[in-house]
Amino acid sequence: MNAREALRAGVREISANKFRSALSFTAVSVGVASLLYTLAQTQGMKQALERNLELMGPGRMTIEKKRDYVSKGLSGGLTYADAVALRRELPDLYMVDPRSSYSLTVHYGGRKLEGVDVAGTTPDFRKRDWVYTLRGRFLNEWDVANRARVAVLVQPAGWVKKPFWAKFWGREDDYDKFAARVDVLGQRVRIVDSVYTVVGVLTPPPRDLDPRWDSWSTPNAFVPITAFQQTFGKGDASADLVDEIRVETGDERTLAARRRQIEAILKRRHRGEEDFEIKDQREEIESEMENMRKYVKAGLALGIVALLAGGIGIMNVTLATIFARVREIGVRRAIGAGRDDILAQFLLEAAMLGAAGGLAGVGLGLGGVKWLSGLGGTRDLAQPTVLHCLGVVALASAVSAGFALVPAWRASRLDPVEALKAE
Amino acid sequence: MSAPAAITVENLARTYQGGYQALKGVTFSVAAGEFAAIMGPSGCGKSTLLNILGLLDRPTGGTYRLEGALTAGLGDAELTALRRARIGFVFQAFNLLPRLSALENVALPMAYAGAAVAPRLERARALLDRVGLGRKGEHTPLQLSGGERQRVGIARALANKPALLLADEPTGNLDSTSSAEILALFKELNAEGTTIVLVTHDPAIGASAQRVLRVKDGLLA
Ligand SMILES: Nc1ncnc2c1ncn2[C@@H]1O[C@H](COP(=O)(O)OP(=O)(O)O)[C@@H](O)[C@H]1O
Ligand SMILES: [Mg+2]
C-alpha cells in the first residue's frame, strides 16, 4: 500500500463520516489555534523585551522621591544639585539625566493650549530610550549652563494603523492636534510667561511601532532643566527639586556597585534622610514579563487542554469508525492484510484528521493573530513562524495518532473470523 | 515423486470457547488442482473447517498441512503472509469494500502484497476482464448486481495468483442464473489449474465437483 493511496483512502473514510470527523476536527483546530496564538505572544514578548532592554541600556536605574515619605526637615529633597553632584563624584556614569515636568499653558500666535506636558531635562536625555527623529537640534550643554530659553517640541506621529480602542478611548488633546498641523520649528512660543525659541522638533515612532515599554509617557516639550527651574519654579527652596534622575552606568556589571555609591552620596547630601528610591527598571520590566509569562502559561495550558480534548474526540471517532467497520477489518484480514496494515490504516486516518484539524487551526490562528494585530494594541504579538505552524500541525497529528493508538491496536488484534461475522 | 497435496488434514478438531465441539476430528486431503465441495446441513461445521483451511482460524486439535507444510506453530504474521500469497477467499455476502470501486477492490490484495500501483491496476483490469466485468471497473459495489459483485469477489480472490481458492457458499445469495454463471467460472478456473474448495448447499455445484466431502456434526460422513 503506497502512501498516496493510503492517504486517499483516509480522505475517503474521513469525508464519509463528516459529522463525526467535524467534531474532533474542530476541537483539534481550536487547540492548535490557541497554541499558535500563545507561541506568537511568547515570541512577541521576547522580542519586545529584548528591544526594550537594548534601548534602556544595560546598567539603567531611576532615582525617584520615595513615596509617602514624611520628611524630618533635614533633607532638601531630590534636586538638580544632586544630579550635578553625582555627575561630579561618579564621572564614569554614562548618563545622569535629571528631569522635572509640569502641565503648563502654551501660547502660540493667537492660540492658547492648556495642559501641555513640559519637561526640563539635560542633553543626557538623548543617551537612552532615544527612538525619535529630530529636526533642528536637541538641547545642549550650553543651553543648560546658560538657562537658555530654547525648547524642543514633540510632534506626535500618530498610528500606522489606528487600533479600534484608540478611536474612542485614546485622547487627542489640544496640543497633539496643534502639533500635527502647525510646524513651529524656529518659531517662538510662550510657555506661561516666558518666551522660548523652538530649536528642534522630535518625532517619536508611530504609536503602534514604538518599541518602548512606556511610550505613552513622552512629554510634549523639552526645555533645559535650569531654564525650567528658573521660569516655572516657585522661587523658593523647592525650585531646585526634580521628579527623577535617570542614571545609566553603561555596564551591567557596575550596576550594583554604582547603586550603592549613589545611595551613599545621596544619603550624605540628604543629611541621613532616605527620602529617595533607586529603581532598577530592568527588574521592573522583568517582573512585568514574569506576570505576562503566567498568562502565556495559562494560554499554553488552554491550548493543550483543547488539543487533548480534540485527541479524545479523535479517539472517539476512531472507536466509532472501528466499531462500524469491524466486518471490513475481517475482510481486509481475509484478503491478506496483516495486523500492522490494520493498525497503520487507523493510525493514519487519525493522524490525517489531526493534521487537517491542525491546518485549519493554523489558518484560524494566523487569521486571529492578524486580526488582533490589525486591531492594534497587541504590538507584542509576533507573526507565528513557519516552524511554529509546522510544529503545531505535527503536534496535532501526533496527538491524534497517539489517542487513536489504543483503539487502532485493538482493531488490529481482532479475530478475523469473529470480525467477518459482524454486521 | 508426486507434488504434495494442496491440503492435508488429520484428526482436525475445533472446540470453541465454552466447550462446543464444531469439528470433532476430520481427516482428508485435497490434491493440487482438485475441485472439492463441502456439503452438509447448517451448523455442522463447514464454515469452521473452511476458516481453518484459509488460515483465518486455528484448529484446537489435529494437524493441517498446506502444500505439505505444517501450519501449526506459525505466528499471525506468517499465517497472514501465507494466506496472502497462496489463498484466495470468496464469501457468500461478497464482502466488497463499499467505498472502493470494483477495480480498487480487486487491486487491494496486491497492495497488501506490496505490488507497485501500475502493475497492480493492470492486473486488476485483466482480472475484471477475465470475469467478464472489464467495463465496470469504475463502478462501486452498490452499482453492481449480486452476480456481478460475486464476480468482482472472485477476481479479487485471484489477485495474488493463489494456488487455493476457498469459497463459503459463494452462490448462497444468488439467483439460479447467476449461480450457474459463477459455477461456470469456478470450473474454468479449476481447468486452468487452481485448486478449489467450496462450501455449498447447491446440488448442481456438488455434482460438478470432483469430490464431495460430507460433513455431519463435526465429522466427515
Ligand atoms: N465462535 C463460536 N463460538 C461458539 N460456537 C460457535 C462459534 N462459531 C460457530 N459456532 C458453532 O459451531 C457450529 C458450526 O458452525 P459453522 O461452522 O459456522 O456451521 P456451518 O456448517 O453452518 O457453516 C454451529 O453450531 C455454531 O453455532
Ligand atoms: Mg456456514
Image (cartoon, rainbow, N blue to C red):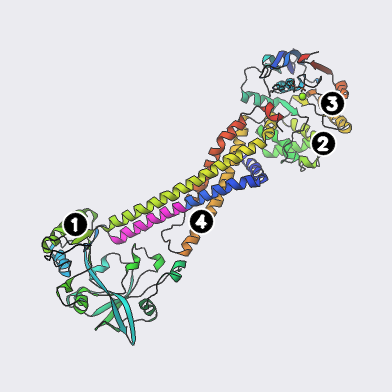
**Disc on the earlier residue, 1 or 4:** 1
Q: Which residues are magenta?
A: A37-57
Q: Secondary structure at mark 3?
A: helix
Residue A48: percent from the left, percent from the top? 37, 58
Q: Nearer the viewer, mark 1 or mark 3?
A: 1
Residue A54: percent from the left, percent from the top? 31, 59
Taking B39 as reference, is A378 left or right?
Answer: left
Q: Which residue matches tag 3?
A: B187
Q: Nearer the viewer, mark 4 or mark 3?
A: 4
Q: Secondary structure at mark 1?
A: helix
Q: Which residue matches tag 4?
A: A366
Label 2 chain ID: B
Answer few, some or many: residues within 10 Å of disc 3's Cα (few below 14, many 20 plus, some between 14 and 19).
Answer: some
Which amino acid, by three-letter code, is at mark 1? Arg
Q: Which residue matches tag 2?
A: B146
Q: Which residue matches tag 1?
A: A259
Indicate whether B96 appears above or below B47. Answer: below
Q: At x 21% / y 55%, what residue is drawn?
A: A255
**Rounded to the nearest whole Å, what is the CA distance between mark 3 and mark 2?**
19 Å
Q: Nearer the viewer, mark 3 or mark 2?
A: 2
